[in-house]
Image (spheres, rainbow, N blue to C red):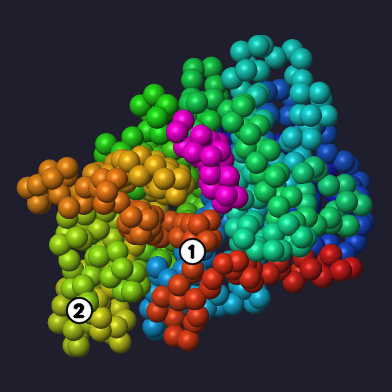
Amino acid sequence: MDENIFKILPLSSKHSIAMKKFLPLLVLVFILISLESCEQNDFFTLTNPPENPWLNVGEFERAAVSPYNYAFCVDWGGGYFMQSRVVLDVMTDVLYRIPGASANWPIDVVYNRQTQVEADRVVNTFKETYQAIGICNAALDFYYEKKENPYPNASRDDIEKNLKRIVGELHFMRAFSYYHLLLLFAPAPADPDFKSKEVLPYRVSFANAEQASKPVYATADTLYNVVLNDLLKAKKLLPDKYASGMHPSYQYGRANKFAARAMLARVYFRLGEFNKALAELDTIIDQNNGEYSLNEIPIEAFRHDNPQRGKEVIWYALYYDVQKGAIPKEATLFTYLDYRATNGGHGPYHRRSTWHTFSMSNNAAKRIGWMDSENHVTDNALTDLRYKQLYWRLEGNCGTPGCGDPEYYEMQYTQVKEPHIWGDKYFRGTDGRFTNVPVIRLAEMYLTRAILRYRQGNLTGAANDLNVVRKRAWDAAATGIPFEDSEAFMTAATITEEAIHLERIKELAFEGDWLIYCENLALPVLPGERPGTEVVQPPYNGLYWVVPQEELDFRSN
C-alpha cells in the first residue's frame, strides 16, 4: 500500500475559507472503519500504518470538516441529510406522487412505505452516516487518548476558542449522524422493539480489525442515549457564536451551542421528555440575545447563496462555495425548481425541474385550508406569505400544446388535470446551485414549544407561540387588516391542538418533519392519496427501513 495515501492533503489556495471546511480532507483511512462490509481481516492490516495527521490545533481543525461533508456534500444527493429529508417526507400523507413522473431510484418503494425493501437512497444514507461517525470516532479517540490535552504547547486562547470547539463539533456531528440513522432504521419510541431489538451497529470509537469484522449491534434506546450524551457534551463545549480568535471558517455553516440545544430539543421531544425539551426551547427562543428572530419574511431563510443567513436560521447547510457536484440535487424530487435556476427561478428566470416527482397532496392542501373542495385557491392561502413565497401552484393541464403559460399550468405531465401545490423552498438564490439550505429554523422551535405547552395545559403560552409564527406569515398589506384583528389570531379560548398541527404542515412541509412529528405525538400516519393504503397507528410497527442486506450478510458472517 502506498504510504502517501495517509498524508493530509493541503488546502487549495483557490478555495475560500468557507470552502475549506467542506473539503473531504480526512477521508484517509477512516473510510476503512465506516462499516462498509469486508470479509477479509487482511484488508485492515496496514503495511504503513498512519501517523497522527493533526500536529497542532490548526491541523486538528481539519478533523471537524469531513463529517459536515458527509452530511451535506456528497455527490448528487447532497449527503445523508437531504436524502433522508426526502425519504421521510415522501412517506407521509403530505406528499403526492405525480403519475407519469420518474426517477433513477425506486421512488414508489419509498412512497408506498415498503420499508422491508432496499431503496438505494436509503442505503446511501446508511453508508454516509457511518462514514461520518467513523471520522468523528477517530478524531475523538485521538483527543481523549491524549487525556484531553493533545497540544500541551498550545495557547490558552487557542485551546478555549478552537480545540474545545472542534471537540464539541465532533460530538455534535456524531450525534447528528446517529440521529438520522435512528429516524430511518430504528423503531419509533412507541414501538415495543425500541428497547429490546438490536437494530444498528454500535460505534463510538475507532474500530480496529477485530472490531470491524465483529460488529456489535445496539437497541434504539441505547443509541439515543449516545446521541443525548454527545449533544450534552457539544452544548458544553460549543460557543454561542463565532468570535475573534476562532478559525475563520467557523463563521459559516458550522454548529454552535444553539444548534446543539435545538438538536437536544428535537431528541427530547422524540423521547417524550417534554420538560427537558421545553427547557432547551425556552433558552433558544427567549435567551438568544437577538441572534435569531422571525422578523423577516419567510423567503429570507431560503434564498441566500452567500455567507449570510436569514435571521430565523439557527443552522444551515452551506452550499454557496462548495466543490462542483456537491449540490443537494436530491431536493429536485420534491420541489418545483431545477437546481440550476437563477434569480429565484420565476418570471423571466422561470426554470422548472424536469424530474420532480412529489407535490403536496391535494388532501393535505385542503386540510390546511389552501384549497377548497373544488381545488380552488382560498383566501386562507392568499393571505399567507409562505404560500406566496415558498410554494408554487400549477393549474391542471389545459389539453392542447401551448394552451397555457407553463409557469402557471401543468404542461410537463399532460395527464395531470387537477391543480397541485409544489414545494418551492430550494434553489431560490441568485444561483440556485449554490443556495444554502436551512437545517434548523426558529419557526420549528416555536411550533414545538406551542404543542408541548398545549399538551401541558398552558394554552396562553401555546397561543402566543403560534401567533408569533402566524404573524410572520400574515400578509397585512394584502388584507389591510392587522394580524391581531384577524381570524388567524389565537387566544387561550380559541386555540386547538389541530390548529398547531396544521400550522406545522404549512411551515415545515418539504423539510422532512411531518412523519417524525406524528410519531413523537402518537398521531396516526395517514394514507394521503395512496390507493389501498391504510392508516398506520401507534406504535408504528415496521415503519422503519431494513438495514442494508450487505451489512446483514456481514453481521451473519
Q: Which residues are magenta?
A: 259-283
**What residue is rendered at 71% in x and 68% in y?**
548
The image's mark for residue 523 is 1
Q: Is residue 56 above or below residue 310?
A: above
Q: Is residue 153 left or right of residue 280?
A: right
Tell me the kind of residue under disc 2.
Glu
Magenta-drawn stretch contains 266: yes
Image quarter hosting the C terminus? bottom right
Q: Residues within 10 Å of mark 1 (few under 14, many from 20)?
A: some
- x, y percent for residue 420: 28, 73
Q: Which residue, given by chain and number where applicable, does mark 2 sit on?
A: 374
Tell me the kind of residue under disc 1.
Leu
* SS assignment for the magenta stretch, majority: helix
- x, y percent for residue 34: 75, 53
Q: Secondary structure at mark 2?
A: loop
- x, y percent for residue 306: 37, 39
